[in-house]
Amino acid sequence: MILIESITKFFNRGSINEVLSLNNISLTIRQGEFITIIGSNGAGKSTLLNCLAGTYFPDEGKLTFNGNDITQWPEHKRAQFSGRVFQDPMQGTCAAVSIEQNMALAHKRGDIRGLGIGVKKRDRQLFREKLKILGLGLEKRLQDRVGLLSGGQRQALTMIMATMVRPDVLLLDEHTAALDPKTANQILELTQSLVEGLGLTTMLVTHNMNQALISGNRLIMLHMGKVIMDVKGEEKKNLTVGDLLARFYEVQGEDFSPDRMLLTQP
């Protein structure tokens, strides 16, 4: 279980450029929940994920993971229990080395790394089995440099790497946003399969409202650093894009009209 207690995060605090990104947010994330997070630009979506990952430390509040206070744990220490996939397909892998070397590093997450051979023979069969899931033929290209792969192939590889050692929490920061629609759908299907198959606790940030509705079992909407909607189960299943837009315009003090549905097209 992850407890987010009264988290507040500023950027450029005390300057004329001060931004309040997270405003006293409290959430309880239970094991096995698949949460989609939506909101406008600057709502605090990625900041929330970065605070969980340890990229940023909150200015106020507390983060607890399975009873441990991790508020001041650095990013590398939290990587022992978290997997992460970024929006940019180039961020999750090292282009200069091979597919199998990338996977070997992911396979060692949380372990003490010595100076032995980077890729052991007994691991290669495991890597091939994992890659076969993708249906991209990458299991036959273990020695190819990752830099030779397309963006979609690299993002698919990153998904496999992020879940190779089962993470306690999987953080997905708009991980399909930089891909073409067909590839984005393939990555989303892979995500659903991995999350359901492994029973992963997952947080997915997205701008795509349709994606937020069809993914996961809980939906959170942020606005100006605050939670303005938190629904799960049947209540989430019954939501429409129109419902989400109506809530968004409501907090802005505007009326929602059906014509604004056109703005939701990806």
Image (cartoon, grey):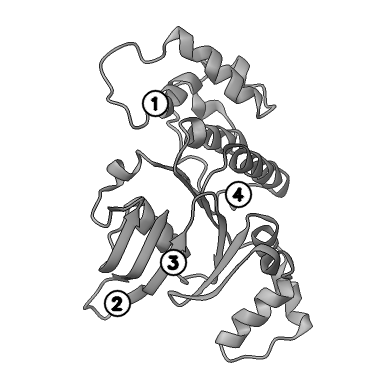
Seen at 38% across and 64% down, the residue is 4
Q: What separation in Å lies between label 2 and label 3 (alpha carbons)?
A: 25 Å
Q: CA distance from mark 2 to mark 1?
A: 38 Å
Residue 49 sits in quarter:
bottom left
- For this orientation, the residue located farthest to the top is 121
Q: Identify the residue shown where x is 42% and y is 31%.
A: 94
Looking at the rendered structure, which numbered label has been put on residue 105? 1
Marks 2 & 3, CB-CB < 8 Å contact: no
Please tell me whether residue 89 is drawn above or below residue 211 in the rendered image: above
Measuring 72% from the left and 70% from the top, which residue is drawn there?
Answer: 239
C-alpha separation, residue under disc 4 versus residue under disc 1: 23 Å
Badge 1, how many Cα within 10 Å: few under 14, some, many 20+? some
Q: Nearer the viewer, residue 136 or 228?
A: 228
Q: Earlier in the sequence, mark 2 or mark 3?
A: 2
Mark 3 residue type: Leu
| Mark positioned earlier in the residue sequence (2 or 1) | 2
Quarter of image, res 259 = bottom right
Image depth: mark 2 or mark 3 in front: 3
| Secondary structure found at label 1 | helix
The tag earlier along the polypeptide, 4 or 1, is 1
Residue 185 place in picture, x, y as percent: 70, 46
Q: Are marks 4 and 3 in contact (CB under 8 Å)?
A: no
Q: Earlier in the sequence, mark 4 or mark 2?
A: 2
Measured from the top left, where is residue 14 in percent x and y?
21, 78
| Residue holding disc 3 | 27
Which amino acid, mark 1? Leu
Residue hosting label 2: 18
Q: Give residue 96's position: percent from left, percent from top.
A: 42, 26
Label 4 or label 3, whichever comes before in sequence order: 3
